Image: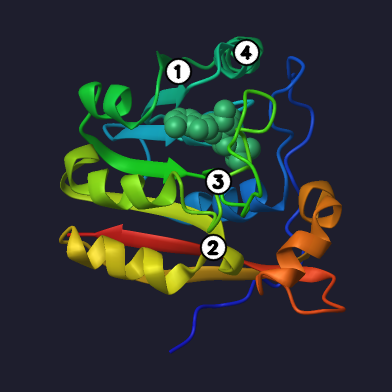
Amino acid sequence: MSAPVRADPQPRPPGGLFRLPGVYRPQHDTALLASVLAEDPRIGPGLRCADLGTGSGALAIGLARTGAAVVATDVSSRALASAWANAVVRALRIGLVRGGLTAAAAAGPYDVVAVNPPYVPSPAPAVRSTRAWDAGPDGRELIDPLCAAAPALLNRNGVLYLVQSTMSDVDKSRHALAAAGLRSKVVARAEVPFGPVVSGRLRYLTERGFVRPGDRTEELVVLRAAR
Ligand SMILES: C[S@@+](CC[C@H](N)C(=O)[O-])C[C@H]1O[C@@H](n2cnc3c(N)ncnc32)[C@H](O)[C@@H]1O
């Protein structure tokens, strides 16, 4: 059976979050993953959750509102400062960890891991100003190591939620998760208009077959993975 497509075809990004310059503005991918997390009845007090690559903290804040204990990680100190400020003004507590997957694993394991990674195929290596979205020639620079590290991040009954574009090959993620010992399924899909990053490199993406000529939308997918 195929995963439900959201009734709202363009899930609305959460607004009202403070962001220091350069921090990712919550977008349709944030909103789609947030809606899936909000529908998981397990998430609540007593669970330990992680938001990997937290950006403004949008997902971490949604998780913390349920009463779960939340760790927000990011390689960007500006992102962590923004997430911290957004939690404080909402009287929520979140733990902060600066770093990538190794640092996140060291602070784990978790019952729930939510990730909206960089996944846009990029002609050049990511730099500080583009690392929120640029993800190497196939868009999988973070997704592949994440799938391999997933078992180390999760408790025995832990669940990983990963949002990505179909541009960065969802089947490849499922195979990588299976190779790591996790079963996965698509739990949500949404067709959304190209954002500014994809629109700005349409020629590159079309030439390499990530986008068909004339396309103006991409499909976002949320994977749920567990042992
Ligand atoms: C697409 S943004 C998502 C932000 C936020 N979670 C959201 O959904 O709005 C990706 C985030 O991952 C962070 N990031 C990039 N590479 C990372 C890595 N190797 N480890 C941890 N975070 C990383 C970026 O700084 C950015 O904040």
**Residue 172 versus residue 111 in the image, above or below:** below
Label 3: which residue?
Answer: 135
Label 4: which residue?
Answer: 78
The reply to whether dot 2 and dot 3 touch (C-beta < 8 Å) is: yes
Q: Residue at x 75, y 70 (%)?
A: 206
Residue 185 visible in rendering = yes
Q: Residue 16 location in percent, x, y?
A: 79, 28
**Residue 58 versus residue 112 in the image, above or below:** above
- In what element is the residue under mark 4? helix
Ligand 1 quadrant? top right
Considering depth in this image, is 175 or 88 the residue closer to the camera? 175
Please tell me in which quadrant of the rendered image residue 56 appears: top right
The reply to whether dot 2 and dot 1 touch (C-beta < 8 Å) is: no
Label drawn at residue 94: 1
Q: Which amino acid type is marked by label 4?
A: Arg
Q: Quadrant of the C terminus?
A: bottom left
Q: CA distance from mark 4 to mark 2?
A: 26 Å
The reply to whether dot 4 and dot 2 touch (C-beta < 8 Å) is: no
Q: Residue 15 location in percent, x, y?
A: 78, 35
Label drawn at residue 168: 2
**Residue 216 versus residue 137 in the image, above or below:** below
Residue 41 visible in rendering = no
In primary-sequence order, the first of circles 4 and 3 is 4
Q: CA distance from mark 1 to mark 4?
A: 16 Å
In primary-sequence order, the first of circles 2 and 1 is 1
Q: Left or right of 11: which side holds 225?
A: left
- In what element is the residue under mark 1? loop
Q: Residue at x 81, y 61 (%)?
A: 202
Q: Residue at x 73, y 19 (%)?
A: 19
Q: CA distance from mark 4 to mark 3?
A: 20 Å
